Every structure is written in C-alpha cells, then in structure tokens.
Amino acid sequence: MTPQYHVVTLFPALFTALTEYGVSGRAIRNKLVELKFWDPRDFTSDSYRTVDDRPFGGGPGMVLMAEPLDLALTAAKTALRRAGITQPRLVYLSPQGRTLNQTLVEELAREPALVLLAGRYEGIDERLFARHPMAEVSIGDYVLSGGELPAMVLMDALIRTIPGALGHADSASEDSFADGLLDCPHYTRPEVYLGGEAPPVLLSGNHGDVARWRLKQGLGRTWQRRPDLLQGRPLSREEQNLLDEFRRETGDTV
Ligand code: ADE
C-alpha cells in the first residue's frame, strides 16, 4: 500500500524542495508515496486568518492557537479515514522530541500513514495535544525556526526506504547506517588524481575483495569516528577480524 504523509504546515510552498527534486520528487511523481498538505490558515474564521496569539503569562514571541491546528489535524484524519486508515500516527516535529535516527526512520516507515505537524513561533497551545495525542520527533539538539525542514528531513529519510524509490544507481542497503555502520569511502575516475591513487582493490574486478574492503573501511571509520555506534552492535567474527586488520593497517591500534 502506498504510504501517505499528510503535513499540517503554515508554509506548504516550502515543501517543493522535497516534492520537486531528486529521489523524493521522483518517488512522488511515480506514486510510490502520496503527500498532502493542510494549511491551518484555511481553518480560521476571521478575516485576518489568524493562527497565533500572544502567550498567556507574557513573554516574547507568539503561540500557535489550538483551534486552527485542531481543525487541520481533524481534516487530515478524516481524509485518511476515508482512505481506510483509521488510526494514523501523528508526529509533531519539535526539539523536545525523541532524536531521529535510522532505527526510528525504519519504525515510522512501517506505518501506512503519518500526519506530521510542523510548528512555528514559540510553540503550540498545549491543549492541542490532549485532543490529538502525538509522538514528538527532533532532528537534533539545535533549534530551527519551524518544523518544516525537520518534516522534510524525516520524509526524505522515509521515502528512501520505499522499495523502488532509489534508482539502480543508488541502493539503500549500501547507505550509511543501513547495517548500523558508517559508509566506506568512494572513488571514481580518474584512477590517479593529482598523484592520489584510487585503492587498487576497487579496480581489481574481484567482487568479494571489494565487498570485504568496503566493510573493513565502514567498520574502521565507525570505530574511529562514531565508536558509540559499535556499543550496541555486536561484531561477527569476520567483522572483528576486518576491524583488527583496519587498525593494524592504519597503525590505529591504541
Ligand atoms: N523545530 C525546531 N527545531 C527543531 C528540531 N531540532 N527538530 C525538530 N523540530 C524542530
């Protein structure tokens, strides 16, 4: 079934970066995924189409009012119910959420539909969350001006996991993190660039040797740069041997 991602956002036009370019744009055009946008301003009843107001208790900035978001989320849920999806997961993009990683991407990719809420300003009237329970997801420990870029980051990562979304040229199974490791280095023509040679094994035509070299480099880089990733990932005997080899070859044996 085609995954459906409904996004509640004040700035639907920003999403052309996702919908019109690259892997995600092609997946949408090929109907491997369906996106729909709901603008809370379309659910206001005053002539200014007001969606925000000053915070009770004072302080800087504005707060998004509950009602336009409530109505937009309800409209998204109603549309999904009509499409046969009764309990879509709701995700609010916020720096207070669970930090996104490939494990969470894969978990969310199993959902037939998601309703993403992109916030703006200082925050959202808390009473919205009582009416629409949602998971909170952060894309990292820094603050952005809104949830649109995080929603695009999440959807880009989700779309890459859809079978057929990646062309022949790129494959998700070769991505960084696909097997819990960082990616290996890459090379293309020329074989020698300004005196720097591409590793001869990559030109050997021996697929087994190439695969072992790539795994060794991925293991070595992970060990050097992100040892935390190896904590929860037991190594097979072959992987341990390759990592030991990497450390001997690089003199990085500590
Ligand atoms: N909104 C603002 N900053 C964010 C972040 N780091 N992650 C998700 N949503 C956000």
Image (tube, rainbow, N blue to C red):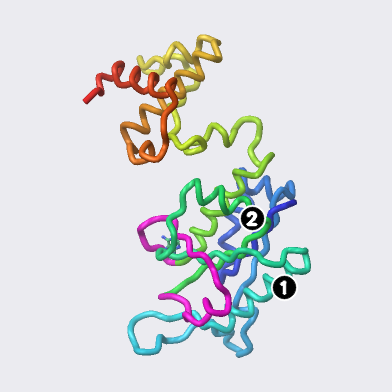
Q: Are marks 1 and 2 in contact (CB under 8 Å)?
A: no
Residue drawn 58% across and 49% down?
A: 158
Quick check: 123 above or below 155? below
Task: Please state the extent of the stretch shown in magenta in the rendering.
Answer: 122-145
**Label number found at residue 78:** 1
Asked if disc 2 is less than 8 Å from ligand 1, the answer is no
Q: Is 254 placed left or right of 146 in the picture?
A: left
Element type where label 1 sits in the image: helix
Residue 127 falls inside the magenta stretch: yes
Residue drawn 45% across and 18% down?
A: 213
Q: Is 180 placed left or right of 26 in the picture?
A: left
Lower sequence index among marks 1 and 2: 1
Residue 67 sits in quarter: bottom right
- Tell me the amino acid under the disc marked 2: Glu
Q: Residues within 10 Å of mark 1 (few under 14, many from 20)?
A: some
Q: How far across and down, in percent of the image, does residue 85 sit?
A: 72, 64
Question: In front: 126, or 27?
Answer: 126
Q: How far across and down, in percent of the image, does residue 57 sit?
A: 35, 89
Question: In front: 80, or 148?
Answer: 80
Question: In front: 20, or 8?
Answer: 8
Q: How many marks?
A: 2
Residue drawn 46% across and 53% down?
A: 100
Quick check: 244 above or below 136? above
**Label number found at residue 194:** none
Q: How far across and down, in percent of the image, does residue 246 sit?
A: 34, 20
Q: Residues within 10 Å of mark 2 (few under 14, many from 20)?
A: few
Quadrant of ligand 1: it is: bottom left
Q: Of circles 1 and 2, which is in front? A: 2
- Tell me the amino acid under the disc marked 1: Thr
**How far is mark 1 from mark 2, CA to CA?**
17 Å
Element type where label 2 sits in the image: loop
Determine which residue is flagged by label 2: 111
